[in-house]
Amino acid sequence: MENSPQALIHVVDDEASLRRALVFLLESAGWQVAAHDSAESFLAAWTDPAPPGCLILDIRMPMMSGLELQRILNERNIRLPVIFLTGHADVSIAVQAMKHGACELIEKPFKDQVLLDAVGQAVRDDLAHRDEASTRQALRSRLDKLSPRELEVARLIVEGLPNKTIGQRLDISERTVQVHRLHVMEKIGIHSAAELTQIVLKADRE
């Protein structure tokens, strides 16, 4: 994979020697790296919006553990892919980490290529997620052009309801539904119910 020039790989590990080794490995592979000796220092340095990338995180650290940091990231809706490193083959920890959204769990000691492959995949996933989020936002902006009533009509069109049924549901005439339907198509810039359905479903996707 050709490394994304704007990507930043965060390394959070309290063991200085491993932290230096990880930075050297990643930089040798062409990645930009930011190293942190604790979860607290990572959070203090975090800026939003942040460049794409991923987080290489030690599970067991003093003060705040990797799992605790993962929980905080989830609470703050920070969607940075997490690769956990662990020296303890603890199944329950692995289950917790993956259940809460970790993209990979790698046991120490590990082969360099295993980590590099995981980083490459995590960055690809992050870039794809950002593209999807950008697309959703653009589609939501198009739907924001609609009045509340037009949006109601649009969502009922997406359900596959005919104009007559939509009118009955909203207690308006079928002719009024047709007018709203026309306005919906004009404002969003589409020509069919199928296009409208795609836009609404993609905009609603989390």
Image (cartoon, helix red, strand yellow):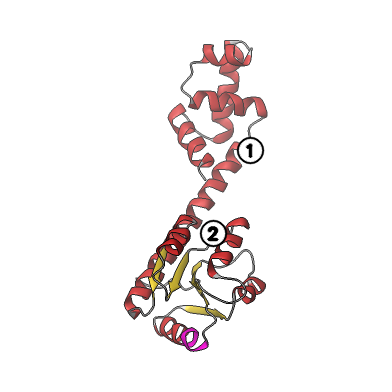
Res. 45 image quadrant = bottom right
Name the amino acid type tagged 1: Asp
Which residue corresponds to the image point at 44% horizontal and 73% vertical from the top-left?
85
Q: Where is residue 78 in the image (x, y as percent from the top left)?
A: 58, 60
78 or 15, nearer to the observer: 15
The residue indicated by pointer 2 is 79
**Mark toward the start of the polypeptide (1 vs 2):** 2
161 or 38, nearer to the observer: 38
The reply to whether dot 1 and dot 2 touch (C-beta < 8 Å) is no
Relative to 175, is 22 on the left or the right?
Answer: left
Q: Position of residue 64 (x, y in %)?
A: 61, 71
Res. 24 image quadrant = bottom left
Badge 1: few (under 14), some or many (20 or more) residues near its Cα, within 10 Å?
A: few
Dominant secondary structure (helix, strand or loop) of the stretch shown in magenta = helix
Q: Where is residue 122 in the image (x, y as percent from the top left)?
A: 42, 65
Which residue corresponds to the image point at 47% horizontal and 32% vertical from the top-left?
197
Does residue 74 belong to the magenta stretch? Answer: no
Q: Is mark 2 on a helix, strand or loop?
A: loop
Relative to 110, is 190 on the left or the right?
Answer: right
The residue indicated by pointer 1 is 144
196 in relation to 136, above or below: above
Q: What stretch is highlighted in magenta?
A: 16-20
17 in relation to 200, above or below: below
Relative to 122, is 47 on the left or the right?
Answer: right
206 or 88, nearer to the observer: 88
- Can the viewer see residue 49 in this picture? yes
Distance of label 1 from label 2 (alpha carbons): 25 Å
Q: Is mark 1 on a helix, strand or loop?
A: loop
Which residue corresponds to the image point at 58% horizontal and 23% vertical from the top-left?
153
Q: Position of residue 1 (x, y in %)?
A: 34, 71
Name the amino acid type tagged 2: Arg
